[in-house]
Amino acid sequence: MLRLYNTLTRREEEFAPLRDNTVRMYACGPTVYARAHIGNFRTFVCVDVLRRTLKYVCGYLVREVVNYTDVDDKTIAGAQQAGKPLREYTEHWIGAFRADAGQLGLELPEETPRATDDLNLRAMSDMILTLERNGHTYRRDGSVYFKISTLPEYGKLARLDHEGMRDGARVDVDEYSKDDPRDFVLWKASKPGEPSWDFGAGPGRPGWHIECSAMALRLLGEAPIDLHAGGIDLIFPHHENEIAQSEGATKREFARFWLHVEHLFVENEKMSKSLGNVYTLAEIAARGHRASALRYLLLSSHYRKQLNFTWTGMDQAEEALRRIVDFLARLETVTAAGEHPAVRQAVDRARADFRAALQSDLNTAAALAAIFDLVRDVNAAIDARQIAAPDAMAVRAAIDEFDQVLGVVSLRQAEDAQPPVPVEEIERMIEERKAARRRRDFAAADAIRTSLADRGILLEDNPGGTRWKRK
């Protein structure tokens, strides 16, 4: 049984979907005014593993929504600065996010709504009107605000102190102080030069928080949804305000489980533009690292622990992936007949350990350890010639099962299939090198090896022939 830490209750609890064996799950997506950075992607990669665990380990169906926040203070300011319509401006950044997500091997959610889609804007307006009927709002200067004093349970996710709340103080911006609960804007009155819609709440645009509440319930059905995920920085005010809006409108619990991913630090410092340590995937690649290594690094620590990104850590992730891929290549050299019970026992042990790790609040670090225990045991069996071809097939099947969840090996292999040198050219140069060695022109053979190495391709000679791999 899967156990997850529920931020709402501050304890691990057994998780199962409420109905139909389908997990209805919402994760806050990117605000599309710039390229997502590696701190953002720590959350998205961990949520992707949650999704895969629910599907491939637990056997549930998953209906996941990951939104694009394409209207807020930052997107509007960015579009105005770029001199572009909001939709055109945000479309560029949505494309960039999708490209990066693809490189990191994220599975596509079932729904990826944009806040400015008409159906979503209408759902936001309808929710605001319902909140108004339920006595949770007031209007001021054409804007609609949520009055937090009308909801006694406000603050239950972030464990806020009601005594310290500033009754009647209003906030109009989409982001505000993490320590200062105030009435927040649901719908902002039209301002000159800003986009505006009117679906019944008056001319204007939505506040940031209402977007997620309305899209979650429109696309996942009536409350409660099973699971809501996001970065730990969203607990307050964003997720707290989502709960207030949703529960104020429906008079029902909004989400049963809340899962939050901890911060990513860079070389022991918080990410900051002033420090120049806010890295994107493209900047990671420019330093010679691949997306598969970043995904591996982001899964190397438990999602509820702060993770320190370092370039040394990236080197170690690259080496760990090389070790697994080389191991799989070594398995292909096993051709003996028969079976060896010790190998099958190692496979069974690894399967049990892997499943137990993920069922224990997504302990990806322990899951990776189970894989490397299997690699160690089977390498020893190969050295001792205590393994046969059917055993090797069983090991490979187990690694494939593990990678359905972690998604690092298949990502590395897909990268290897698109090397920096065209495959046809690599194979031609290998044949030229063979010919040079046959005529004992070892200088020419070494020159070919060196040329490929300089271009990111390593050649390995073994009894079965020459194998190439990316650096």
Image (tube, grey):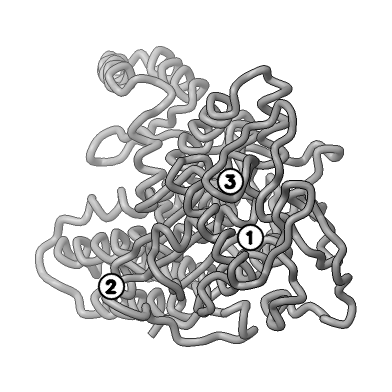
Q: Which of the 4 quarters of the picture holds residue 288?
A: top right
- Report the amino acid beneath label 1: Gly
SS state under label 1? strand
Q: Counting residues from the N terminus, which is met first, the one under dot 3 or under dot 1?
A: 3
Q: What crowding class fits label 2: few (fewer than 14 Cα within 10 Å), some (14-19), or many (20 or more)? A: few
Q: What crowding class fits label 3: few (fewer than 14 Cα within 10 Å), some (14-19), or many (20 or more)? A: many
Residue at (72% x, 55% y) in the render: 185
Disc 1 + disc 2, Cβ < 8 Å: no
- Residue closest to the far left: 337
- Could you say where residue 65 lies in the image, as x and y percent from the top left? 43, 56
Residue at (74% x, 68% y) in the render: 147
- Could you say where residue 434 lies in the image, as x and y percent from the top left? 27, 21
Residue assigned mark 1: 231
Residue assigned mark 3: 30
Q: Is residue 453 left or right of residue 235?
A: left
Disc 3 + disc 1, Cβ < 8 Å: no
